Image (spheres, helix red, strand yellow):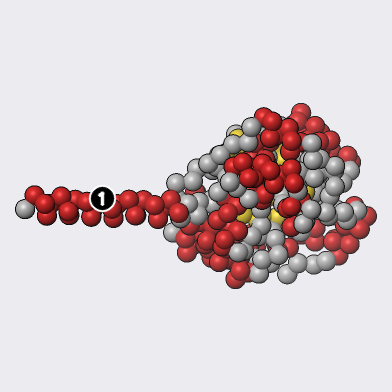
Amino acid sequence: MKTKIYYLFAVAIALLLATSNFASAQGQNISVPKLKLNNGIEMPQFGLGTFTASNEGCKEACLVAFKNGYRHIDTAHAYRNESGVGEAVKESGIPREEIWITSKLWPSEYGEGITLEAIDKMLERLQTTYIDLLYVHQPVGDFVGAWKDMEKAVEAGKVRALGISNFDDSDEVFHAIVDNMKIKPVTLQIECHPYAQRKDIREKVKPYNIAIECWYPLGHGDKGLLSDPVIGKIAEVHNKTIAQIILRWHIQEGFSVIPGATNPDYIKENISIFDFELSNEEMTAMHSLNKEQRFFNMTLEQKQGFVNFKMD
């Protein structure tokens, strides 16, 4: 009788451990750190970028991400996949307040009166009553008028925080918002990775306590960056991939980072960076790779054409 009880007990323990391991594999035990923004709100430091994902592909990617511990999704009207994000949030069963949703307004939606209407339509696409972080996507057109409407949206409870995306093109566009608007940006979203560490921009935002959020954190898949021998040696030490070392570097630099992926394996790989740390010597080696080499180099003048590109 005792043998049978011990056997059943052992089976129960095995099942419990298996369930625990499954939950861990699904990312439920991953603890993503949060950044405290200059308005006092905390934002998950790590998230999923959705640039280039189709609407359905975005939905599926978000669902995989949620199962693996992601709680921060970055989208935009220009990506045409906001409704996919909204559907994934609904289907995930995760309380809305536990998920951070970022989106961005396109220049054709800028202007007092125009932007408020665009925000309401964005809320409909996302199937939510509020957006956690809203960006002006590009520094062209009437972004000042847009910002005034965005401030009204914050006051109405439709948006929690405001940010500027790609406002590293000139001092003029940066200071037009940062120095003159009632609500200050909490974040500046720019291209940033070990080959373009953006040291000048980082110094510029420090007095305003503006967080840097990084797109193209893996260099848009640049083969040179993703096979860099310096990063490769660090990866071998930690039994991690080069991509994971790069993303870990972003975290330890204090950035918010939003690598894009639709492949489930990459989604899982990217978030598996919170079980190790880079040493001071390894961080110094990463710093030595900076050559301010950007992979997206459209000029401000070229971006002016975005104003006439209407989003439906």
Q: Secondary structure at mark 1?
A: helix
- The structure residue drawn at horizontal position 88% and vertical position 56%, both measured from the top left corner, is 298
Along the line of sight, which residue is nearer the eye, 96 or 17? Answer: 17
- The structure residue drawn at horizontal position 85% and vertical position 47%, both measured from the top left corner, is 293
- Horizontal side of 256 relative to 285 (left or right) equals left
Locate the C terminus by quadrant: bottom right
Q: Position of residue 119 (x, y in %)?
A: 67, 57
Along the line of sight, which residue is nearer the eye, 297 or 268? Answer: 268
Q: Is residue 48 visible?
A: yes
Along the line of sight, which residue is nearer the eye, 120 or 100? Answer: 100
- Residue 124's place in the image compared with 281, above or below, is below
Which residue in the protein does label 1 denote?
13
Q: Position of residue 288 (x, y in %)?
A: 79, 36
Name the amino acid, label 1.
Answer: Ile
Q: Is residue 215 visible?
A: no
> Residue most toward the left?
1
- Residue 214's place in the image compared with 223, above or below, is above
Q: Position of residue 17 (x, y in %)?
A: 32, 50
Q: Position of residue 303 (x, y in %)?
A: 88, 57
- The structure residue drawn at horizontal position 54% and vertical position 52%, both measured from the top left corner, is 70
